[in-house]
């Protein structure tokens, strides 16, 4: 599977274009509304056929470009069934699989940032959304986030993957592009080096982060897959 | 060879950490002064031995972190001989090679942005500095830049590489992380699709870009490898 990382500077969001080299069947993970034109041009230039628009969760910091891209490509929008999405084509749950050519994408439910986080797995790589970030993890203080769920998702589910699995997050704020499961088991500042749930919970409860500035338009916009004109 | 892309948000600069998995011998391409602490911590966490600090040219938009990293690691600073660098350990020229374990890094002189641009080649990948950017190229209007040299570097040297060679630039301003030689031959807006030198020159002469805001401190700072206290 080929992987192309794309970045939205305004919201520090990574989107990913992944495709099967043989059939050119493709998926876009976490597109950003303002980048739809760029992404569609890139898809066209690479000669790809977009089959799936994979959302890792209902984002609070940006509006998805999935709806607009679906209109241009007829791709299917996938999101976790807990999301309550009014517009997705497929409400996925743990264990579901999708094919690009012969390449398998599988769904791991990794809640904690929200109740509807998905990590999409392909051979050798995990697209971890706002669950596992490089040396960090997503916040747990809104959208049914939960310290308990996040700790379980990170330490029991994601840290059970092979240590050389590449980790591709939905955001980064320090200029990191990727990591590996092994690195995060050792060096993640919130759960690495065998931190206990108590250690983790103390860190998370002390973050005092401001609310994402776009949350009041992003969440309802994403419940409609970013189809804002409809 | 393992490749890790790192980003400096303030100057839109990509640095690269590359290493040989077997021996853990590493090089850092185009470090940024403000990111030295991040980079050194990452190098330490990954258990790497930095052998080379590879500069693609004397940058005008940021100050290199090569000098400060050399002090911590004893790595050798490499830059093109045309740079007039007062502090580099190795003044390189086309055809020079460097080893990380058994992996070969080779030097291609690709002037045009300046007179001292190097593209560093490893198997399957080219670190093109400010010569070839994704769908774009570096400006040619200062530091002995030249439309003629840039056109030759792009169309004769870089476009002679295998089309599936991955392209890793020193900057991007649209959220692209990488490309391939084949994509750029087709879709680069300045030289792709067999644009003539006249086409190219008209585009470059019409850019009217503002001067990089840090140029007056960056160029002299980089002539001293970023060792600003010495």
Image (tube, coloured by chain):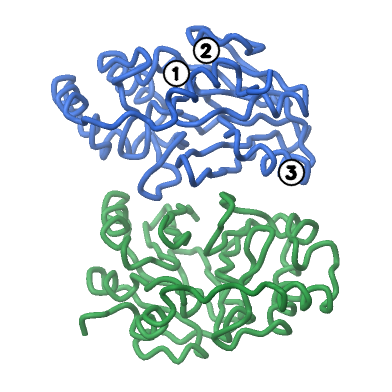
Chain colours: A blue, B green
Asked which secondary structure carries label 2, the reply is strand
Q: Return the mark for residue A41.
A: 3
- CB atoms at circles 2 and 1 under 8 Å apart? yes
- What chain does badge 1 belong to? A
The residue identified by callout 2 is: A80
Disc tally is: 3
Asked which secondary structure carries label 3, the reply is helix
Residue B228 occupies quadrant: bottom left
Q: Residues within 10 Å of mark 3 (few under 14, many from 20)?
A: few
In the foreground, A225 or B81: A225
The residue identified by callout 1 is: A117
Note whether A117 is above or below A91 in the view shown: below
Where does the image place residue B126, in percent across and percent down from the top left? 60, 64
Note whether A12 is above or below B226 in the view shown: above
Note whether B179 is above or below B110 in the view shown: above
- What chain does badge 2 belong to? A
Q: Residues within 10 Å of mark 2 (few under 14, many from 20)?
A: many
Asked which secondary structure carries label 1, the reply is loop
Badge 3 and badge 1 both on one subunit: yes
Note whether B2 is above or below A57 in the view shown: below
Q: Earlier in the sequence, mark 2 or mark 1?
A: 2
Q: Residue at x 69, y 27 (%)?
A: A68
Query: On the picture, is A89 further left or further right than A8?
Result: right
Image quadrant occupied by the C terminus of chain A:
top right
Residue A6 occupies quadrant: top right
Q: State the separation of the CA atoms marked 2 and 1.
A: 7 Å
Q: Residues within 10 Å of mark 1 (few under 14, many from 20)?
A: many
Callout in the foreground (2, 3): 3
Q: Residue at x 29, y 33 (%)?
A: A185
Where does the image place residue B59, in percent across and percent down from the top left? 46, 76
Callout in the foreground (3, 1): 3
């Amino acid at each position: 599977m080929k992987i192309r990382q794309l970045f939205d500077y305004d919201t520090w969001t990574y989107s990913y274009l992944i495709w099967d080299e043989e059939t050119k069947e493709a998926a876009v993970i976490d597109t950003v509304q303002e980048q739809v034109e760029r992404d569609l041009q890139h898809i066209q230039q690479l000669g790809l056929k977009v089959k799936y628009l994979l959302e890792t969760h209902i984002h609070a910091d940006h509006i998805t470009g999935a709806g607009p891209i679906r209109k241009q490509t007829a791709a299917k929008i996938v999101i976790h069934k807990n999301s309550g999405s009014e517009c997705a084509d497929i409400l996925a749950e743990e264990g579901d699989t999708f094919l690009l050519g012969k390449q398998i994408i599988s769904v791991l439910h990794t809640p904690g940032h929200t109740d509807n986080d998905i990590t999409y797995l392909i051979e050798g790589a995990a697209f971890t959304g706002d669950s596992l970030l490089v040396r960090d993890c997503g916040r747990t203080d809104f959208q049914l986030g939960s310290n308990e769920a996040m700790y379980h998702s990170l330490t029991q589910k994601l840290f059970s993957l092979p240590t050389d699995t590449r980790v591709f997050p939905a955001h980064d704020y320090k200029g990191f592009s990727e990591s590996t499961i092994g690195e995060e088991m050792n060096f993640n500042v919130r759960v690495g080096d065998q931190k206990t749930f108590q250690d983790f919970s103390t860190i998370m409860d002390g973050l005092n982060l401001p609310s994402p500035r776009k949350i009041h338009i992003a969440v309802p916009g994403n419940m409609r897959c970013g189809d804002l004109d409809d």
